[in-house]
Image (tube, rainbow, N blue to C red):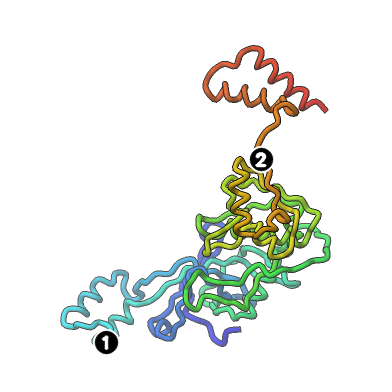
């Protein structure tokens, strides 16, 4: 654990469902490199308990005066270099504030209890930077759920390491997040995030882990732009076909396309002459002879989308076939 706390907690309040603290760093602490990164995870101690906090925001704000304009203007009247010639003005104005939200705390058994219903008292709360050991325990923790969950044999794979963006000093290669692929078998999982945050790459890693750990689990991937099949840009992770080849996972991908020859050339270019061992390319066609209900439904819905009334024979066929399909 960190030897001494950083900054001083000056406020504790509720913000919606969360508990938030405001931490103030002095100019001296900033000079010592104690500035926190946005998104950084910290340890908040209060009442004999340790909570996990995350830095949401950072901003400069004076402490002695509500408005720094007077102090800065007065310092600049006769001084050219404010930092060197008038350090007192700099100290008065240059206080760094952090908004820190309490995410929860790690409890017994390596479980993580999200959120907190307690507001830490201002005079008791202390904020510490987390060590790599603390960060590793946090990433290894599992979210505590209500009810009893039957323990099963787990297989763990390294999913990635902790990094606060691309900021220098914000990467922890030794703090590894492990994941159990069984969490995604027979369950519904949603992946939310802003554009450019790596959702597609993360999904490809999950699918590759599933294919490697569970050879008999089937996967249906709807990929309109073939983003998941191949990746040729150096800034993104490999496509599933490339990852499966590297791991020796054969015969797990069927790719439907209306441009079979073009994609056969691309797959040969990136996977070599043995690409057919990993990807089966099939024509994207519908056999209306074997599935007449699809032809009727397509014609019916096309009329409706065009704003026209379907003819009586088409409407009768549509509802007749629908009843037949739905009949047990």
Element on which disc 2 rests: strand
Residue 125 x, y percent position in the rendering: 55, 76
Element on which disc 1 rests: helix
Residue 225 x, y percent position in the rendering: 56, 47
Q: Tell me which numbered mark, 2 or 1, is placed earlier along the sequence.
A: 1
Horizontal relation, residue 22 to residue 224: left or right:
left
Q: Looking at the image, which residue sits at the far front? A: 273
Toward the viewer: 16 or 77?
77
Residue designated by label 2: 283
Toward the viewer: 52 or 164?
164
Number of the label disc, if any, that sits on residue 278 = none
Residue 154 x, y percent position in the rendering: 79, 66
The residue sitting at 69% across, 63% down in the picture is 143
The span from disc 2 to disc 1 (Cα, nearest Å) is 73 Å
Horizontal relation, residue 173 to residue 6: left or right:
right
The residue sitting at 74% across, 22% down in the picture is 321
Q: Looking at the image, which residue sits at the far top? A: 312
Mark 1 surroundings: few (<14), some (14-19) or many (≥20) residues within 10 A: few
Mark 2 surroundings: few (<14), some (14-19) or many (≥20) residues within 10 A: few
Residue 301 x, y percent position in the rendering: 60, 25
Q: What is the quadrant of the N terminus in the image?
A: bottom right
Toward the viewer: 235 or 144?
235
Number of the label disc, if any, that sits on residue 84 = 1
Residue 296 visible somewhere in the drawing = yes
Toward the viewer: 129 or 241?
241
The residue sitting at 57% across, 16% down in the picture is 309
The residue sitting at 16% across, 79% down in the picture is 77
């Amino acid at each position: 654990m960190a030897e001494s706390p950083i900054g001083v907690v000056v406020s504790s309040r509720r913000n919606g469902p969360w508990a938030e603290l405001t931490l103030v760093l002095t100019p001296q602490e900033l000079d010592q490199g104690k500035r926190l990164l946005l998104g950084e995870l910290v340890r908040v101690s209060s009442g004999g308990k340790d909570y996990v906090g995350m830095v949401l925001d950072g901003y400069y704000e004076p402490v002695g005066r509500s408005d720094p304009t007077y102090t800065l203007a007065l310092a600049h009247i006769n001084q050219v270099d404010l930092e060197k010639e008038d350090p007192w003005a700099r100290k008065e104005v240059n206080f760094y504030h952090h908004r820190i939200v309490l995410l929860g705390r790690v409890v017994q058994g390596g479980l993580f209890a999200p959120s907190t219903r307690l507001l830490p008292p201002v005079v008791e709360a202390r904020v510490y930077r987390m060590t790599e050991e603390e960060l590793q325990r946090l990433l290894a923790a599992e979210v505590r759920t209500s009810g009893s969950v039957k323990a099963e044999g787990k297989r763990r794979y390294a999913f990635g390491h902790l990094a606060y963006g691309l900021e220098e000093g914000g990467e922890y290669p030794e703090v590894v997040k492990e994941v159990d692929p069984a969490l995604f078998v027979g369950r519904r999982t949603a992946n939310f995030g802003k554009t450019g945050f790596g959702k597609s790459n993360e999904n490809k890693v999950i699918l590759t882990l599933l294919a490697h750990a569970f050879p008999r689990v089937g996967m249906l991937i709807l990929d309109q732009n073939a983003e998941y099949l191949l990746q040729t840009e150096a800034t993104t992770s490999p496509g599933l076909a490339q990852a499966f080849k590297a791991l020796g996972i054969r015969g797990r991908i069927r790719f439907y396309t209306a441009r079979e020859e073009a994609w056969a050339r691309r797959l040969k270019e990136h996977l070599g002459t043995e690409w057919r061992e990993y990807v089966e390319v099939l024509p994207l066609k519908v056999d209306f002879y074997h599935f007449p209900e699809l032809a009727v439904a397509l014609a019916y819905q096309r009329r409706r989308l065009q704003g026209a009334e379907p003819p009586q024979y088409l409407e009768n066929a549509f509802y007749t076939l629908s009843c037949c399909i739905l009949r047990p």
